[in-house]
Amino acid sequence: MATPHDIAVDPAIAAPAAGMSGWLKFIGVLNILIGIPYMIVLVGFLYIWLGVLLYQAGDAASTAGAQDVPRLLNKLKTYFIINGVLMLLGLLVFILFFTVVGVGFFYGVFESAMDSATRV
């Protein structure tokens, strides 16, 4: 029976994986460094977690053996899920913020118009 070490990985997968290993590690370290100051507002742990995931994916990509490719893909999957959820939350906060600002603006304009109309 073949072990995962005996199974060869397709060069079409192994070569790009090895090529992106350095970039994954670099971006992972940057995310960790960016997350450290953000720990003050408790959002930094997400940056650090994302950085660790990318760094681990870079480690798995550097060897790109049969046992490392699923690990690489699982780390990237988790990274993209977390990043996607954060982007959706950011979009929701953006929409909520501009809704509140818009309502406040139009309320102010309406109140100003009503004050002007009552003075006449």
Image (cartoon, helix red, strand yellow):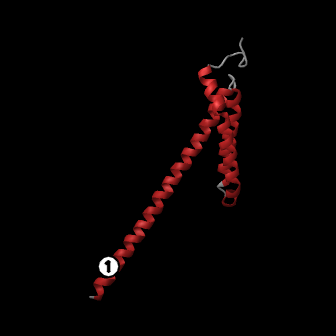
* Residue type at tag 1: Ala
The C terminus: image quadrant: bottom left
Q: Nearer the viewer, residue 44 or 25?
A: 25
Around disc 1, counting alpha carbons within 10 Å, would you say few (fewer than 14), some (14 to 19), or many (20 or more)?
few
Residue 44 at what x, y percent from top left? 67, 54
**The quadrant where residue 65 appears:** top right
**From the image, which quarter does the N terminus lie in?**
top right
Q: Residue furthest top?
A: 1
- Farthest bottom residue in view: 119
Residue 109: image x %, image y %? 36, 75
- Residue positioned most to the left: 120
Which residue is nearer to you in this view: 13 or 5? 13
When asked about the image quadrant of residue 118, the answer is: bottom left
Q: Is residue 105 above or below residue 60?
A: below
Q: Residue at x 48, y 58 (%)?
A: 94
From the viewer's perspective, is residue 4 above or below residue 55? Answer: above
Q: Residue at x 65, y 49 (%)?
A: 47
Numbered disc total: 1
- Using the rendered view, name the quadrant where residue 76 is placed: top right
What secondary structure is marked by label 1?
Answer: helix
Which x, y percent locates residue 41?
66, 60
| Residue that label 1 marks | 113
What residue is rendered at 67% in x and 47% in y?
A: 30
Q: Which residue is drawn at the image coordinates 65% and 27% (left, top)? A: 69
Residue 79, x across and y down, in percent: 61, 41
